[in-house]
Amino acid sequence: MVKPFVSEEVLLDPEMRSSEVLDFERRLLGKIVGQDRAVSRIVNMYQIYLAGMAMPGRPIGNLLFLGPTGSGKTRVVEASAEILFGNPRAFIKIDCAEFQHSHEIAKLIGSPPGYLGHRETPPLLTQEAIDQHQTDRARFSFLLFDEIEKANDALWQLLLGILDKATLTLGDNRKVDLSRCVVFMTSNLGAVEMSEMLTGGIGFTSGVKTDETNLAEIDRKMYYTALDTAKKKFSPEFMNRIDKVVVFRTLNQQHLRQILDIELNDVQNRIMSSQSDKQFIFRCTADAKEFLLREGTDLKYGARHLKRAIERHLVYPLSNLIATGQIGLGDVIKIDLGASADKLTFSKERAVSAFPVSDSGRVAEFPARRASQAGAKLQPLETEAASVERV
């Protein structure tokens, strides 16, 4: 007697992500602070691409980033490019403020044959330009239209074909395929209204504590405020071609503290990637960090103001100390707040005597024990130099 075949059901988990995507998400969250929603959208698109499930005949994804200046809209694209392509500038960036007149579109697609200057103005968006940053591991490209609201309507019309059909016709009738592109667009539309909303809720000037319910409500209002402003600016045809609209929140002080640590680590990486005879480590005291936060906190400009404060109060003085020979190979520099509380002080604590040097003359390895003694811990870099994370 033949037994009837009984199939066994296995419950699947559609929320599970591949190890490659999880690694990308982990590294991206390590670079981007306070914008988990944007990270999630990019990670999801990367998963779709790896699975081969991107919609045929369209870009891999069309994302519109809205939010105040300095909230990290462009930084998300840079960080993603750095992780996936090995270079934070490995994407094509179109500054839309340069395309406020219809005739300036020729800079993107070139002039038609017979027009004056046809051969002298090669188009920016050629197939070669689109594909130039692709690698064996990442066979796709990033295309960023920065501050899209500043562009002329002619650029928005040009984008309709890109966002819908993933094709672009150049002035000489050559076709450009953008089906292996992720198209990013950033805009500051609604930024004023969002800043006012945050000032009364979770901004720096508010002394009122907000619970998770209030934060969620503020987030919801910010999203619809920015979205309504965008819908008033752009046509329905344009908005319907966007896959995801992501609203970036204004960074609060907790976010800026995290960004400060990341930026200080980046400064240390600059030092460790510099000339082999000028590498040293520095550590900032708690008072020094508070000073940098105080000088770099500005609700209007977000993280950009913090970066300027670090360059002005830390990087520039360190550069002077290096140039004048006051800092040398292996030194450990302590950065503290001066007695007047209006400037930082720099002092040499001790020198690290052993810097192993490779055959190329670069520092091959930074001694972990010495770094630990100096109040820092090492992070592996994807370069020859060591990375020191401030503790």
Image (cartoon, grey):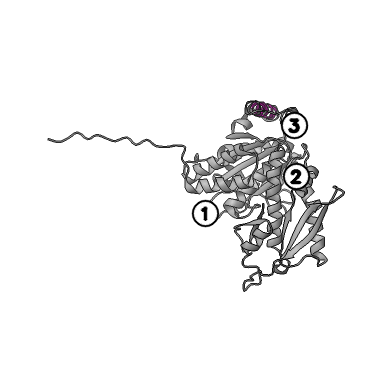
Residue 59: % across, % down: 56, 41
Say which label, 1 or 3, has the lower sequence index. 1
Q: Residues within 10 Å of mark 1 (few under 14, many from 20)?
A: few
Disc 1 + disc 2, Cβ < 8 Å: no
Q: Which residue is mark 1?
A: 137
Examine the image and state in which quarter residue 75 appears: top right
Residue nearest the viewer, comparing 164 with 372: 372
Identified by mark 1, the residue type is Arg
In the rendered structure, does residue 321 fall within the stretch colored magenta? no
Identified by mark 3, the residue type is Ser
Q: Work out whether residue 111 can be spotted.
A: no
360 lies above or below 150: below
Residue nearest the viewer, comparing 1 with 344: 344
Residue 344 is labelled as: none
In the rendered structure, does residue 221 fall within the stretch colored magenta? yes
Question: Can you say which quadrant of the picture contains the N terminus?
Answer: top left
Circle 2: element type: helix
Identify the residue shown where x is 86% and y is 50%: 339
Q: Which residue is mark 2?
A: 304
112 lies above or below 218: below
Residue nearest the viewer, comparing 3 with 336: 336
Q: Which residue is mark 3?
A: 195
Specify whether 385 is left or right of 345. Answer: left
Circle 3: element type: helix
Identified by mark 2, the residue type is Arg
Say which label, 3 or 2, has the lower sequence index. 3
The stretch in magenta equals: 217-229
Residue nearest the viewer, comparing 343 with 172: 343
Structural distance between the alpha carbons of marks 1 and 3: 40 Å
Residue 155: % across, % down: 69, 39
Q: Hey, which residue is sitting farthest right in the picture?
A: 340
Circle 1: element type: loop
